[in-house]
Amino acid sequence: MKSFYGAAAVLAVIGMAGCAQTDETDQEAGADTAAATAPATTPAQTTGAVSDGQILHIAKTANDADIEGGNLAKTKGQNEDVKAFANLMISDHTAANQAGMQAAQAGGISAQDNPTSQQLMADHQAATQRLQSLSGAEFDKAYIAHEVDVHQKVLNALDQTLLPSAQNPELKNVLAQVRATVEAHLTRARDIQGKLR
């Protein structure tokens, strides 16, 4: 049985939106960042019902991607708040991996690959490639803009797709608990984003 690798990220690395910038140089950099990492789809756009096994695979894929993103930001980030946020993403998603594995085992659920998971991985690879090409303050802004966008989408997906679709009580409980963490991540990312402008 494949394990459930956490729902804290649930759908992280779905895409990235550049921030609105005030001068032409910043607008160009923001447009480049947004274009390079724009999502082809989001989990909320999936058609039909999402099974518990598919939710597990989406969570595993997304959680692993967010940990990788945190590791990248930890090494490439310049701002101390950005580095601290990256560490938070790594620790929270690692803890979610452990809790998720227990929920999957208790619920007897096997992860099932699906088009949403595949798209998440493709989007993550594109975002990673773009973020690797940035450095310093430009990286910090792009990474945090990405985290703000992703966490908002995660909240939307939890409320509109994942929680309503989950059938297994253990899975539903994990998803419900995760919502508060995702909301806290979003609040923190927005706070950092405001300081970086």
Image: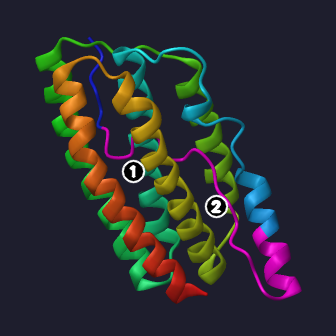
Screen quadrant of the C terminus: bottom right
Looking at the image, residue 118 lies above or below residue 51: below
Dominant secondary-structure state across the stretch colored magenta: loop
Residue 52 horizontal/vertical position (percent): 34, 17
Q: Judge whether 1 appears above or below 72 on screen.
A: above
Q: Is residue 12 visible?
A: no
Where is residue 173? Give x, y as percent: 18, 33
| Residue drawn at (25%, 57%) of the image | 91
Q: Which residue is mark 1?
A: 67
List x then y, in percent, for residue 36. 76, 54
Left or right: residue 195 versus residue 163 is right
Is residue 180 in view? yes
Residue in view at x 24 percent, y 40 percent: 176
Task: Report the disc number at residue 132.
Answer: 2
Q: The N terminus appears in which quarter of the rendering? A: top left
Q: Secondary structure at mark 2?
A: helix
- The amino acid marked with disc number 2 is Gln
Left or right of 81 on screen, residue 41:
right
Q: Nearer the viewer, residue 165 or 118?
A: 165
Instruction: Classify 144 as above or below 151.
Output: below
User: Which is closer to the viewer, label 2 or label 1?
Assistant: 1
Q: Earlier in the sequence, mark 2 or mark 1?
A: 1
